[in-house]
Image (cartoon, rainbow, N blue to C red):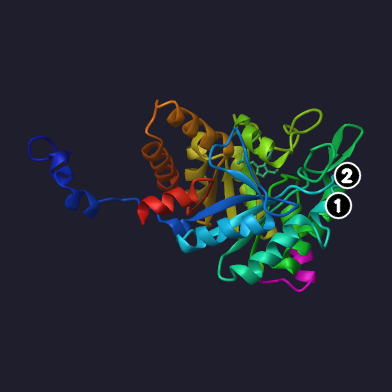
Amino acid sequence: MTQFPTFRGRRLRGSPNLRRLVQETRLTPEQLLLPLFVLPGEGIRESVPSMPGVDRLSVDEMVRDAAEAHALGVGGVILFGIPEAKDSEGSGAWSEDGIVQKALGALRTEVPDLLRVTDVCLCEYTAHGHCGVLEEGEVRNDPTLELLARTAVSHARAGADLVAPSDMMDGRVGALREALDAEGFPQLPIMSYAAKYASAFYGPFRDAADSTPASGDRRGYQMDPANGDEALREVWADVEEGADILMVKPALAYLDIIHRVKSETGWPVAAYHVSGEYAAIMAAAERGWLDGEAAMSEALLSIRRAGADLILTYWARQFARIMG
Ligand code: PBG
């Protein structure tokens, strides 16, 4: 054991130069993905009250924000659609002229070099707000797989660079992989929301995406926050089915899971710093109770330190501005 006075931990904290030299963890804008909410229409920019600084955008306005993120060096955007109309199946999710498909087309021409990621799920498109086919109050697993695969293929055709299934049905990564391969997209990677918990921290997102379940909750398919070993089972299943990047969601309350997934798999790991985690810091900052910039930077750094290779965050542009 090294001991005082031979060991003085403060020696390496004595100047900014020394601190920078031995800094273990760095986070850069290219490791961040910015979530964007897209809705039909033109010139629309609606703020989301529970997510200060986040707007719901028509395609033209979304392109502006995406271009700004790109100019700031942000790694990419992940698109969430709010469709014109919802139905029991969620057919807006795979419609050729669906909102995400339109958004992809616009990004492909207007900001071609920006990485385009899509969230593959049905909850924004179903009238009941669940992430799959609902029969007698139950979300049916196997009939949902085909609809998710259809959605992913339609995103691929419209120009997605990476698809991210967030539904938590069993077998969906395999179903997507098979469909993408069969339709001519064997090179298109899948980022699976592998360990996604049934979390209270999604509240503000559901305001933004208009995806609160009309009845019941998501505990029948999303994971129990009490479980850690189960996350590893989910993660390995997704690896076997062909997932290329593994996501843990939410992030801050699950740093142990991020660490385990990274150290036990060695796979690329993403973490989603979700809406409620963002809102909590923003709300405290608005009241003057926290230094928002410092708290958000520290939160994101901790997620990276835990083992995430990339982070989905609503704060991506602000972070890039501070770094730049
Ligand atoms: C869709 C989906 C959700 C989020 C990402 N994809 C909502 C949910 O599962 O209820 C949440 C993201 C956030 O809270 O920022 N299934």
Local packing at callout 2 (Cα closer than 10 Å; few below 14, some 14-19, many 20+) is few
State which region is magenta. 177-187
Mark 1–mark 2 contact, CB under 8 Å?
Answer: yes
Q: Is residue 309 left or right of residue 225?
A: left
Residue at the image position 52 percent from the left and 57 percent from the top: 268
Q: Position of residue 92 (x, y in %)?
A: 83, 52
Q: Which mark is residue 91?
A: 1
What is the three-letter code of the residue carrying label 2? Asp
Please tell me whether mark 1 sits on a helix, a strand or a loop: helix
Q: Is residue 228 shown to the viewer in this render?
A: no
Residue at the image position 19 percent from the left and 49 percent from the top: 16
Mark 1–mark 2 distance (CA, rounded to whole Å): 7 Å
Decide which of 164, 322 is in the foreground and name it: 322
What is the three-letter code of the residue carrying label 1? Ser
Is residue 90 depicted above or below 65 in this figure? above
Please tell me whether mark 2 sits on a helix, a strand or a loop: loop
Q: Position of residue 284 (x, y in %)?
A: 45, 28
Q: Is residue 117 shown to the viewer in this render?
A: yes
Q: Quadrant of the C terminus?
A: bottom left
Label 1 CB sits under 8 Å from any ligand 1 atom? no
Kindly give the residue lying farthest to the right in the view shown: 136
Q: Is residue 27 left or right of residue 148?
A: left
Q: Position of residue 196 (x, y in %)?
A: 63, 41
Image-quarter location of ligand 1: top right
Q: Position of residue 143 (x, y in %)?
A: 87, 49
Q: Which mark is residue 87?
A: 2
